[in-house]
Amino acid sequence: MAVLVCAQRGWFHTARWPLLVIVSYCGLLLWSAALAFVDGADGFTRALLSPESYLNDVTAVGDHPGEYLRTFTATAAEKSFATRGHPPAPVLLLWAAEKAGITNHLLLGLAVTALGALVAPLVLSTVRDVCGEAAARSYAPLLILATWAVWLAVSMDALVATLGAAAIAAGVRATSKHRWKAGGWALSAGVLLGFAALFSYAAAWLGLSLVCLNFARRRAALNWAAGFGALIPVLLAWAAGFNWFDGLLSAHNDFTARVDPVRPALPWAGISLVALLLAAGPALVTGVRKMRNTPAWAFLAGAGAAVLFSILAGLARGGVEHAWLPFFPWLTIAAVAPEERGGPIPPAPIVLTAAGAITAIIVEAVLATTT
């Protein structure tokens, strides 16, 4: 309610920018935590403690993470469903957290939520650089009360969303620099994207947004630096024993064998589209309608291509609210685009923000949000 009141009174357009960035982080963090806390402390731990979640595979790492990497694909059938469908980074991160003494599941869940909420200031700063400060200020309340915040506190994919947002933010920064500084930022963007791809195979699609943005800003040469940077984490993992492409093939084969017989592709594609509409909120429809009127089209192109590929490849058969979490923030930016190209930026979309918040409350109350 406070966010809506501030938006109605124009606070988001008059506040100092650094304060607005801090409020965006704190707002999304509190919103996602409030939605999770509907179920009490279980709201933060249920996903981690699920029999089919990553935490159950941490013991398999033992004291030999290198051996775990080398045998990851070969022993995929012995792992939980979540681990089979992802690269090894989520399990190794949880293992590292345990080695660092973070054994309390509630604390771990809160840490994941806090890191996931960093997507807000990263996306907001990116929108400011690409679309202008007025558009970013209008988008802030929509981002803070995002419908997809329902899953931010219960999914390791929240970390992927933050890594992906950091990669795109670095890529945008590269286009405003020159020579070595531009190359350095582009390289950093690629490295961040590569690390994201070690958490989720789908995260690689965010690279398309960087490619589109570089071409749109006539900085196509930066794609070479970003591409090289993206290869660094993947090649390091390969040197340690994990082949990313073998892992992707293994995940696809497991998905085909396990899901195909019980979830027909066509009806589940429709169900996934409904999940997309629920997770992205009403702003998705408005954003698609005004896509061509905003410089943010590159973000929508990358995220939209990822969603479309998942559907056409028959991979969208449940769990997309988690798998697509890194794409949701980019699908709704165009909602604050002008009605026509070059026109005035509309004020904060209060109605859309309220509708998205209500949708999140309904989803949390009606559906199970664990992964």
Image: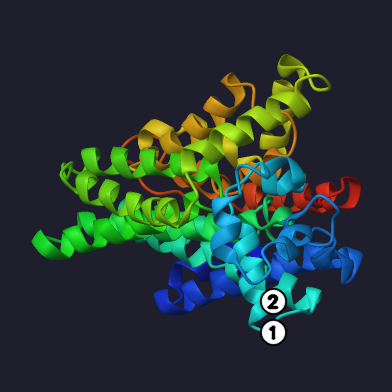
Query: Is the C-beta separation of discs 2 and 1 under 8 Å?
Result: yes
Colour setup of the view: rainbow
What residue do we see at 59% from left, 42% from top? Answer: 283
Give 135 or 25, whichever is nearer the viewer.
25
Q: Quadrant of residue 136?
A: bottom left
Rendered view: 258 above or below 193: above
Outermost residue to the bottom: 101
Please name the residue that numbered disc 2 is placed on.
Answer: 98
Residue at (60% x, 67% y) in the render: 64
Give the left or right position of residue 18, taking residue 85 as reference.
Answer: left
Task: Please tell me the numbered disc located at residue 101.
Answer: 1
What's the residue type where badge 1 is placed? Answer: Gly
List x then y, in percent, for residue 368.
87, 48
Secondary structure under the numbered disc 1 in the rendered image: loop
Q: Position of residue 224 (x, y in %)?
A: 20, 45
Kind of residue sitting beneath label 2: Glu
Assess disc 2: are there few (<14), some (14-19) or many (≥20) residues with their C-alpha within 10 Å of its C-alpha. Answer: some
Q: Is residue 268 above or below residue 344?
A: above
Between residues 52 and 279, which one lies in front from this camera angle?
52
Q: Secondary structure at mark 2?
A: helix
At x 45% / y 55%, what residue is drawn? 237
Point 90% across, 70% down: residue: 40
Residue 342 shows in this picture: no
Q: Residue furthest left?
A: 179
* Residue 113 % position (x, y): 67, 68
Asked if residue 336 is positioned above or below residue 166 in the image, the reply reads above
